[in-house]
């Protein structure tokens, strides 16, 4: 399945929207963004420190900064070295970063965007909305649930009577989860 993106604003609006963004965010956000990109440049130049990583994570999600201390300096150094390697693929760079405690996919993309702003952009729910992807809200969950129920009701799986919640829907959930674990890592 290939994701489909449909630009919601007009192309003519984009530059104005970017200007408006910078005009309307607060001074704190200005400082956080500047610090993040300065830290990204330092990482690009080989300074693989917690302080630089923290500056970027703080820009993306201040609440996640507290989790960074769960990583050793060596683990941070290795992850940043891989992610900032000019030869790293996107997948390799993201995987290295998401192995750090406190770094999920959106944060990893923010780190990459700060290190190489010409190569990467931030995966953010607001940007996705502007490309026609609604937030994964209750409606999204309802559509997902309906799809899964249709699959489960088609008798492609049977209840696992010896396990908790022996329903076809729970069996399907286990099957989907396992497929992702074994195929996607």
Image (cartoon, rainbow, N blue to C red):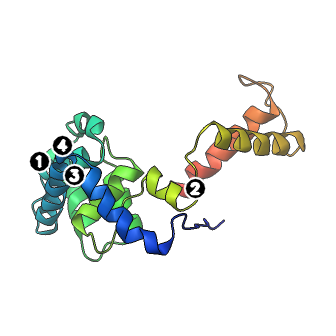
Q: Earlier in the sequence, mark 1 or mark 4?
A: 1
Q: Earlier in the sequence, mark 2 or mark 3?
A: 3
Left or right relative to 182: residue 141:
right
Give the residue pinned by disc 2: 133
Q: Earlier in the sequence, mark 4 or mark 3?
A: 3
Q: Residue at x 67, y 40 (%)?
A: 139
Q: Earlier in the sequence, mark 3 or mark 1?
A: 1
Determine whether the residue tagged by mark 3 lies in a helix, strand or loop: helix
Give the residue pinned by disc 4: 72
Q: Is residue 167 visible?
A: yes
Q: For the residues carrying marks 1 and 2, which lies nearer the camera in this image?
A: 2
Real-space Cα distance between discs 4 and 2? 36 Å
Real-space Cα distance between discs 4 and 3? 17 Å
Q: Residue at x 50, y 59 (%)?
A: 130
Picture quarter containing residue 47? bottom left
Residue 106: x and y in percent read: 39, 52
Left or right relative to 38: residue 10:
right
Q: Quick one: 158 or 107, which is closer to the camera?
A: 107
In the rendered structure, find residue 51 and report the number of the disc placed on it.
Answer: 1
Q: Earlier in the sequence, mark 1 or mark 2?
A: 1
Residue 162: x and y in percent read: 77, 24
Label 4 close to label 3 by CB (< 8 Å): no
Real-space Cα distance between discs 3 and 1? 9 Å
In the rendered structure, find residue 56 and report the number of the disc placed on it.
Answer: 3
Q: Is residue 82 visible?
A: no
């Amino acid at each position: 399945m290939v994701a489909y993106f449909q630009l919601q604003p007009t192309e003519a609006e984009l530059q104005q929207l970017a200007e408006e963004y910078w005009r309307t965010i607060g001074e704190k956000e200005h400082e956080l963004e500047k610090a993040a990109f300065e830290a990204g440049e330092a990482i690009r130049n080989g300074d693989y420190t917690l302080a630089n990583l923290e500056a970027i994570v703080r820009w993306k999600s201040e609440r996640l900064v507290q989790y960074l201390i769960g990583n050793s300096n060596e683990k941070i150094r290795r992850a940043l070295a891989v992610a900032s390697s000019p030869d790293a693929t996107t997948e390799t760079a993201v995987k290295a970063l998401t192995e750090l405690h406190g770094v999920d996919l959106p944060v990893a993309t923010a780190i990459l965007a700060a290190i190489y702003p010409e190569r990467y952009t931030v995966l953010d729910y607001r940007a996705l909305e502007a490309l026609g992807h609604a937030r994964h809200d209750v409606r999204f969950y309802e559509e997902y649930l309906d799809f899964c129920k249709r699959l489960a009701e088609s008798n492609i799986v049977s209840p696992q009577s010896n396990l908790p919640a022996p329903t076809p829907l729970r069996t399907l959930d286990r099957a989907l989860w396992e497929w992702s674990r074994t195929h996607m890592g």
